[in-house]
Image (spheres, helix red, strand yellow):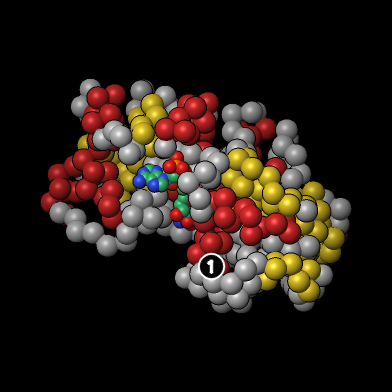
């Protein structure tokens, strides 16, 4: 089979690769589409290697058709059969003709979503769900602040938080204002021109946001804490603005702040709370019905042929990056 190959900092090339084999508890999926994640760009530059034992090929999510079942998945034991159309959360391997996936990381293609577009769901849904699943129900009119509202994660976070009853404010570039608003962000903050703390305080009679989803990290930490309401919670899922910052613990105590930080890729496949299997199961129970009901949808900014993944990476790294996810279609 063929897959996208690369040397660190070198170009991407579609070339022969070893055929994936379905191990125990795995299936092989014939890939119809994969989606680009920022982590793919980091992996190419040698800064984000795959977890031990996982595929070296790029691609953290895909959709396609099951073509082989490994031991333990036969005869629909896990609820899957050859010919099923699925999307999958991967630790790598999506930029390829076929990929081996643990059956516990498969999701059915949700009602109302095409097979190709479903490839844009697993990484964003599982990441955002993991970041918000422990939040209490929002109080009447409680505001959540989503940073990077136009990105792959942000477009999913706006929709999910709205569906769970939050009012949403999102930071984004001016050109992505409409996109964020169309997904349900009541307030869109142009982060280069406006101070998000002022806007959030102004929208909440000075109380602040009950929740902040952060993709910036160190350079936003101080202002994120300023923007949080008493008893507010914050989850950091990326550190685009640095990973080291000083925090006054007294301030956290006084504001009764809950701070979390998380990654998805490094989690174990199985093994209880926090494993990928558990997150995927929860997502299927909680988010998949919201997609079927039309409250949440994949947001695709551009579709690019998989063999032209290089072009999609250039687009993601450019100031013209469209909002939402970049889909690689075979
Ligand atoms: N923890 C995890 O497991 C996990 C999982 C998936 C992704 N991530 C990380 O989460 C981050 C976001 O992922 P993504 O897929 O959404 O990436 P993406 O699609 O490239 O979006 C990044 C977004 O960041 C926004 N942005 C840039 N600078 C900003 C600033 N100063 N303030 C507010 N927003 C700003 C951009 O908005 P504009 O274009 O509108 O300017 C863009 O929409 C990435 O760093 C990714 O690696 C983490």
Q: Is mark 1 within 8 Å of ligand 1?
A: no
Q: Is residue 27 left or right of residue 220?
A: right
Q: Residue at x 30, y 51 (%)?
A: 259
Question: Helix or strand or loop: what does disc 1 sit on?
Answer: helix
Question: Looking at the image, which residue is at 74% across and 63% down?
Answer: 96
Q: Nearer the viewer, residue 78 or 140?
A: 140
Q: Position of residue 59 (x, y in %)?
A: 63, 61
On screen, residue 171 versus residue 309, left or right, reads: left
At a point 23% along the width and 43% down the height, the residue shown is: 223
- The image quarter containing residue 75 is bottom right
Q: Nearer the viewer, residue 74 or 189?
A: 189
Q: Is residue 177 visible?
A: yes
Question: In the rendered image, is residue 267 in sight?
Answer: no
Foreground: 285 or 197? 197
Q: Position of residue 216 (x, y in %)?
A: 36, 51
Q: In the image, is residue 169 above or below residue 1?
A: above
Vertical position of residue 174 compared to residue 43: above or below? above
Picture coordinates of residue 206, whole percent (x, y): 20, 27
Measuring 29% from the left and 33% from the top, which residue is drawn there? 194
The part of the image, by quadrant, that contains residue 322 is top right
Q: Residue 133's spot in the image, x, y percent?
A: 46, 45
Q: Which residue is mark 1?
A: 43
């Amino acid at each position: 089979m063929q897959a996208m190959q690369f040397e660190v900092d070198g170009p991407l090339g579609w070339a022969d690769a070893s055929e994936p084999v379905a191990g125990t508890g795995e299936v092989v999926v014939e890939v119809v589409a994969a989606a680009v994640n920022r982590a793919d760009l980091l992996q190419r530059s040698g800064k984000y290697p795959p977890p031990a034992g996982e595929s070296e090929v790029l691609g953290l999510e895909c959709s396609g058709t099951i073509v082989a079942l490994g031991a333990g998945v036969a005869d629909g034991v896990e609820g899957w059969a050859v010919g099923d159309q699925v999307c999958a959360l991967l630790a790598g391997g999506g930029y390829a003709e076929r990929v081996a996936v643990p059956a516990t990381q498969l999701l059915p293609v949700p009602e109302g979503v095409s097979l190709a577009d479903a490839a844009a769901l697993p990484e964003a849904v599982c990441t955002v769900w993991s970041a918000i699943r422990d939040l209490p129900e929002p109080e009447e009119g409680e505001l959540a602040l989503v940073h990077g509202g136009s990105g792959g994660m942000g477009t999913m976070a706006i929709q999910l938080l709205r569906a769970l009853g939050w009012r949403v404010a999102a930071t984004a570039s001016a050109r992505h204002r409409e996109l964020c608003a169309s997904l349900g962000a009541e307030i869109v903050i142009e982060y280069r021109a406006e101070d998000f703390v002022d806007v959030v305080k102004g929208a909440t009679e000075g109380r602040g946001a009950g929740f902040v989803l952060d993709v910036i990290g160190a350079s936003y930490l101080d202002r994120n804490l300023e923007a949080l309401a008493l008893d507010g919670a914050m989850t950091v899922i990326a550190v685009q603005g640095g990973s080291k910052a000083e925090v006054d613990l007294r301030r956290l105590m006084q504001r009764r702040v809950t701070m979390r930080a998380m990654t998805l890729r490094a989690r174990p496949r199985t093994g209880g709370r926090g494993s990928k299997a558990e997150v995927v199961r929860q997502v299927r129970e909680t988010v998949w019905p919201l997609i079927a009901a039309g409250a949440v949808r994949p947001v695709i900014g551009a579709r690019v042929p998989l063999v032209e993944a290089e072009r999609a990476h250039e687009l993601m790294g450019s100031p013209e990056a469209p909002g939402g996810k970049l889909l690689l279609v075979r």
